[in-house]
Image (cartoon, rainbow, N blue to C red):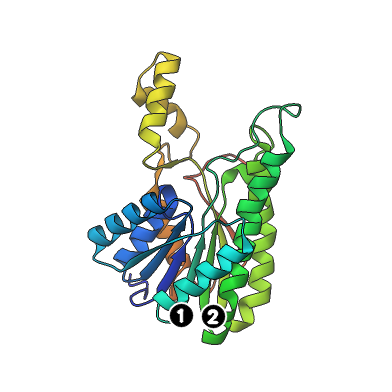
Amino acid sequence: MDLELNGRSAIVTGGSRGIGKTVARVLAGDGCNVVITGRYADTLSTSAEEIATATGGRVTPIVADMTSTEQVNAMVATAADALGGRVDILVNNAAAPGGLARGSLAEIRDEDVMLDLDTKVMGYLRCARAVAPYMEQQGWGRIVNIGGLSARQAAGNLSAGVRNSGLSNLTKFLAEELGEHGVCVNLVHPGTTRTERSGPMYAEQAAQQGTSVDEVERRVASRNSTRRIVDAEELAWVVAFLASPRSIAISGETIAAGGGAGINVYH
């Protein structure tokens, strides 16, 4: 199916690694001109070159910290110039993987929770607010927020759950605000996703547990209905569809893309 993405312009935050990098590669491979953002110039430039080489697309790196309104506004203005004055797609992805506030109630530090919320929830809001005037003027746009299935769990990592739960409300708010201008806004909740971090992480777990990497991966996959770990590219195609004109029937929704993780029913 042609997603009609050729020639579209996209910003992918947190695009230097992991899910964000893969989303940027899929969008570029489908014909989008892409800006990727991150905090570290060297890593960001290397990733932009890798994506451009792999896809033949135009990929522009722009350094920005999502906790700074000034930097976000400057990034979007610079990105719009690089993209020919348009911003068709925003993929909000920048965040600390897994969240920062881990441990028991007594161990959770205020500053970790606040930084997680400032980076992910407020960062997504800052980016959406900055791109909105471009999308409103164009009469078209797509915003895809990347959350996480920790939103549906109340154990293990407080700030990851809180920040991702909050994104559901933010997403619906943005969809209502921008929908009349032809802008659709949706939230994707990844579960366990295979990225470049997975191999070393599973190897470390296998060593600690005295087992094989295959066994660790089997245990992880057993939590999903499909009994397999979702690959970042498979997740990226879900994002690409929601970023495309083909997704016009979907807005303000929260979509789980974790291979059927969990047994709860949501309706």
Q: Image height check: is 116 above or below 207?
A: below
**In this figure, which residue is indicated by the disc labeled 2?**
134
Q: Residue 90's x, y, as percent?
A: 50, 67
Secondary structure of the residue carrying tag 2 is helix
Identify the residue shown where x is 23% and y is 66%. Answer: 56
Give the residue furthest to the right.
106
Q: Residue 3's x, y, as percent?
A: 37, 71
Give the residue furthest to the top.
210
State which tag comes first along the sequence, 1 or 2: 1
Identify the residue shown where x is 59% and y is 39%. Answer: 263
Identify the residue shown where x is 57% and y is 39%. Answer: 262
- Measure the C-alpha gap from mark 1 to mark 2: 6 Å
In this view of the protein, which residue sits in the foreground, 116 or 208?
Answer: 116
Residue 23 found in image quarter: bottom left
Identify the residue shown where x is 66% and y is 58%. Answer: 122
Q: Amino acid at mark 2?
A: Tyr
Query: Marks 1 and 2: CB-CB under 8 Å?
Result: yes
Is residue 227 shown left or right of residue 151?
left
Is residue 128 shown left or right of residue 60?
right
Mark 2 Cα shell of 10 Å, populated few (<14), some (14-19), many (≥20): some
Secondary structure of the residue carrying tag 1 is loop
In this view of the protein, which residue sits in the foreground, 172 or 9?
Answer: 9
Mark 1 Cα shell of 10 Å, populated few (<14), some (14-19), many (≥20): many
Q: Amino acid at mark 1?
A: Arg
**In this figure, which residue is indicated by the disc labeled 1?**
86
Residue 177 found in image quarter: bottom right
Q: Which mark is residue 138?
A: none
Q: Residue 89's x, y, as percent?
A: 47, 71
Q: Residue 26's x, y, as percent?
A: 34, 60
In this view of the protein, which residue sits in the foreground, 202 or 265?
Answer: 202
Question: Could you tell me which quadrant the C terminus lies in?
Answer: bottom right
Q: Is residue 152 visible?
A: no
